[in-house]
């Protein structure tokens, strides 16, 4: 109605939304890897090996989903590796004390959620930077894991528990843990994409102050986000404990960075505001595929580390480059 | 011509859609303080940015020390001895005074910094300014006024002959201002030329030798300070005729909707009281730093209040955080939309529903269809120009972004809407849209209060005007008794 009013810069509608593009490009990278590794070693594409990759990727996918929530708020959760170990230990101690499996697992998962809530409280009310708060709990919880076990893994766990790990399922002959991962990814993918909590998570990462001034309970949302992250880490702890039939105090060491790497390859930004669960799942699969494929092609484990590092930098670099045009 | 340190001749500068400077002349002699005054947006800071190399001019000549120069960047201006001291100081708070003064120009001994010489040299500089400070003190331990002196010290250590001071007294106490003026006196005697930008006209009497007034990008007058008066300067500053840019409407003024009683918050808001009545728009006027934004933020619960009461329709309400205000129907459109108003990387519809999630969620699950419907209604009602509601807010123009910030509050029933600089940085057309929107709200019986630094806007739109100075309300004027001169007088009352 006002000719003087500036016209908005009208961009021609892109064919795909940013999120679809992210999924397509990460999936594309995965496909290219699969082709290259199949050429290098045809065994790569066997159903055995694919299941193997899925199995290896499962714990990382689960924790990376939680890390994605945290990264979107422009935070970071370094404590998840320790939570993996300690929640497994808590569950194992309960089982050894004769508690039923379901109750023991609930104990382990609640322990994890509790650590996450503590992280959130330290950040929100203690006003600590996320990096420092979660680094503190990382060390503390790792110490607790070592103390509870006196450094020795807790073994002889009931079979009903270890079943949640590698046991094949009647459904498609896929191990139980992969199904658990799949269900968790669906639930938390839905929470992030379709619920109020998810929306607030993005909003806080996009502009914390504007979100607060819009009347959003930013404190509560942030605590929820860190609780989700540690809760998922506890799930990874259950699965890893079941896989090796013992709860080791050193389990999950360094996994927090794999989780960051998966999220980032899948399109999350450490600056906040961006990231999606499907992208993160694919990102974790890229890393697992690289590890597995390089193993099969007989690459030295040292070279593997180098290549994964380069891939992380390359993925983010390409993403930046793409976004600026 | 030799006695001019700098001459700016026929300088013009355009930004997309705006002619910021139109053939402006300005000059500076050695040993004088030349004050540059004008309203916000008059072009004075653009002119100074051209002189200091931040912007390049479109037309005109810059002559420094008798030589014509072309500045492509601030560094070139610095090399010609031009130094600008900004309102916000640019010091490394964790370094010492000496380290700050010589930052980037450290005296070397081979590849090590010659600490001793650096400290000695800094001591000499401080002595020249007659400032009693130990050069090894950390800058973070200094008061704002002392930090400013470090900046001045830094300027003269580079042998700057032309020193531009942008609102140097805005954060100083009266005593500190006196100290600053003493230093300015020293600088004058040493033969420096000082360009002094200030809103506080009465302090010009103590420092200015000459005054230049700029208005709407045009040079209005340059005069010797002794030949003029403050009233005169104000007249030149605001002398524009108000055109029909302001679509004022008359409505019946009813009951008091909202009342603020004795509000004190932080250092910036002292015992502020005012009322917003049905059927009127309340304008809150004052200079930058008068505490207007802080008042609005404190009311809204964005910042803490020390004391004071708020009443909505005669009943006391308690607002501790924004969500309390929102639940009471008191909304705020913040001063800086990008910082406080928008999730800039999110689509229009998500910004629109951020404070309205209860309308679009069932059991915490978001109904995107409903969101889009709400947003579409909003863009239609406010004539927001965007290709779709899924467009990222980043890609909208300033005026349309501002409408999104306003629009997100119109989804729920409002009692009071506080606008903080609602038309800052948006074009004329969008401004009128915002004014019309304020009129609509006024007609609907919603309390409207707005803070503005643009006096014509206050005079054009407000039915009643509260003037603030130094955190206090200094006047409450009816639109009929207000004029720019009167408001200016009250806005500078304590200065």
Image (cartoon, coloured by chain):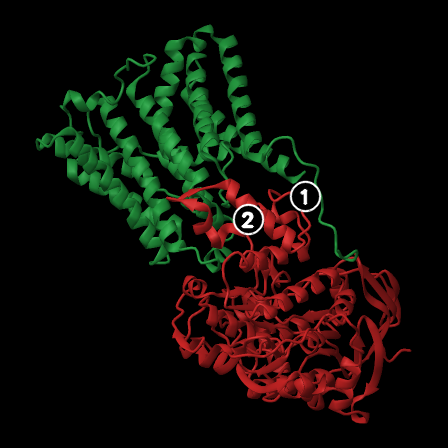
Chain colours: A green, B red
Above or below, B247 relative to B371: below
Residue B387 is labelled as 1
Q: Where is residue A112 in the image (x, y as percent from the top left)?
A: 26, 40
Above or below, B336 relative to A292: below
* In the rendered image, residues at marks 1 and 2 fall on the same chain: yes
Q: How crowded is mark 2: few (under 14 residues within 10 Å), some or many (20 or more)?
A: many
Q: Where is residue A86 in the image (x, y as percent from the top left)?
A: 23, 37
Q: Mark 2 lies on which chain?
A: B
* Residue found at the very far front of the displayed protein: B252
Above or below, A133 relative to B260: above
**Left or right: residue B334 compared with residue B61:** left
Instruction: Tell me what residue is drawn at x 74 percent, y 61 percent.
Output: B429
Q: Where is residue B97 in the image (x, y as percent from the top left)?
A: 55, 71
* Residue found at the very far right of the displayed protein: B1
Which quarter shows the C terminus of chain A? top right
Instruction: Tell me what residue is drawn at x 67 percent, y 36 percent.
Output: A13
What residue would you read off at disc 2? Answer: B374
Res A242 → quadrant: top left
Give whichever of A120, B275 is nearer the camera.
Answer: B275
The local secondary structure at tag 1 comes to loop
Above or below, B405 relative to B171: above
Inter-mark Cα distance, 1 to 2: 16 Å
Which quarter shows the N terminus of chain A? bottom right
* Residue found at the very far left of the displayed protein: A98
**Left or right: residue A99 compared with residue A277:** left
């Amino acid at each position: 109605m006002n000719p003087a009013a500036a016209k908005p810069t009208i961009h021609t509608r892109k064919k795909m939304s940013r999120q679809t593009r992210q999924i397509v490009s990460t999936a594309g990278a995965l496909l290219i890897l699969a082709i290259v590794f199949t050429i290098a070693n045809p065994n790569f594409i066997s159903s055995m090996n694919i299941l193997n990759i899925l199995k290896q990727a499962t714990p990382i996918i689960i924790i990376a989903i939680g890390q994605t929530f945290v990264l979107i708020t422009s935070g970071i959760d370094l404590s998840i590796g320790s939570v993996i170990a300690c929640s497994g230990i808590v569950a194992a101690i309960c089982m050894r004390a004769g508690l039923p499996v379901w109750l023991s697992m609930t104990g382990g998962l609640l322990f994890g959620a509790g650590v996450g809530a503590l992280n959130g409280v330290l950040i929100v009310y203690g006003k600590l930077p996320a990096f420092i708060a979660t680094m503190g709990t990382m060390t503390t919880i790792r110490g607790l894991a070592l103390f509870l076990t006196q450094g020795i893994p807790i073994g002889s766990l009931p079979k009903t528990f270890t079943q949640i790990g590698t046991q094949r399922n009647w459904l498609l002959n896929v191990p139980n843990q992969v199904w658990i991962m799949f269900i968790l990814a669906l639930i938390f993918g839905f929470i992030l994409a379709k619920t109020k909590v998810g929306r607030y998570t993005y909003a806080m990462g996009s502009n914390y102050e504007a979100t607060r001034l819009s009347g959003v309970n930013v404190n509560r949302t942030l605590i929820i986000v860190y609780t989700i992250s540690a809760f998922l880490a506890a799930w990874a702890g259950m699965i890893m404990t079941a896989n090796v039939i013992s709860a080791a105090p050193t389990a999950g060491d360094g996994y927090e960075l794999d989780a960051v790497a998966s999220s980032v390859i899948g399109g999350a930004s450490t600056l906040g505001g961006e990231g999606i669960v499907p992208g993160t799942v694919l990102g974790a699969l890229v890393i697992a595929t690289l590890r597995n494929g390089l193993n099969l092609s007989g690459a030295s484990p040292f070279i593997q580390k180098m290549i994964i590092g380069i891939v992380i930098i390359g993925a983010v670099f390409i993403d930046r480059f793409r976004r600026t045009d | 011509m030799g006695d001019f340190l700098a001459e700016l001749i026929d300088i013009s500068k355009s930004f997309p859609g705006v002619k910021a400077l139109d053939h402006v002349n300005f000059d500076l002699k050695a040993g004088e303080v030349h004050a540059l005054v004008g309203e916000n947006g008059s072009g004075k800071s653009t002119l100074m940015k051209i002189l200091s190399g931040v912007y390049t001019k479109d037309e005109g000549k810059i002559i420094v020390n008798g030589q014509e120069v072309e500045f492509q960047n601030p560094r070139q201006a610095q090399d010609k001895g031009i130094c600008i001291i900004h309102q916000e100081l640019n010091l490394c708070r964790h370094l010492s005074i000496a380290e700050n003064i010589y930052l980037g120009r450290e005296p070397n001994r081979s590849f090590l910094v010659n600490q001793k010489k650096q400290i000695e040299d800094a001591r000499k500089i401080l002595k020249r300014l007659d400032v009693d400070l130990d050069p090894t003190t950390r800058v973070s331990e200094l008061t704002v006024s002392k930090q400013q002196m470090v900046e001045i010290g830094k300027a003269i250590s580079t042998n700057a002959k032309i020193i531009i001071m942008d609102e140097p007294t805005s954060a100083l106490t009266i005593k500190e201002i006196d100290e600053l003026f003493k230093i300015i006196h020293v600088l004058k005697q040493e033969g420096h030329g000082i360009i002094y930008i200030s809103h506080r006209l009465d302090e010009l009497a103590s420092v200015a030798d000459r005054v230049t007034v700029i208005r709407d990008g045009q040079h209005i007058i340059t005069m010797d300070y002794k030949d003029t008066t403050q009233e005169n300067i104000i007249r030149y500053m605001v002398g524009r005729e108000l055109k029909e840019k302001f679509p004022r409407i008359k409505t019946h003024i009813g009951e008091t909707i909202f009342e603020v009683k004795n509000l004190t918050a932080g250092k910036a808001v002292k015992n502020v009281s005012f009322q917003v009545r049905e059927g009127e728009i309340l304008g809150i006027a004052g200079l930058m730093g008068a505490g207007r934004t802080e008042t609005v933020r404190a009311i809204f619960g964005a910042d803490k209040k020390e004391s004071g009461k708020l009443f909505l329709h005669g009943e006391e309400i308690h607002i501790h955080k924004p969500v309390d205000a929102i639940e009471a129907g008191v909304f705020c459109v913040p001063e800086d939309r990008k910082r406080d108003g928008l999730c800039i990387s999110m689509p229009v519809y998500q910004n629109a529903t951020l404070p309205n999630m209860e309308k679009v969620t069932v059991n915490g699950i978001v109904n995107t269809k409903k969101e889009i419907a709400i947003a579409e209604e909003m863009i239609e009602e406010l004539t927001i120009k965007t290709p779709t509601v899924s467009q990222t807010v980043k890609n909208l123009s300033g005026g349309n972004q501002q409408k999104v910030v306003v629009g997100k509050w119109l989804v729920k029933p409002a009692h009071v809407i506080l606008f903080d600089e609602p038309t800052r940085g948006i074009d004329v057309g969008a401004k009128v849209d915002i004014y019309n929107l304020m009129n609509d709200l006024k007609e609907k019986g919603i309390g409207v209060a707005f803070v503005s630094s643009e006096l014509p806007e206050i005079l054009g739109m407000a039915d009643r005007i509260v003037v603030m100075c130094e955190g206090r309300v200094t006047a409450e004027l009816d639109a009929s008794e207000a004029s720019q001169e009167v408001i200016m007088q009250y806005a500078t009352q304590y200065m």
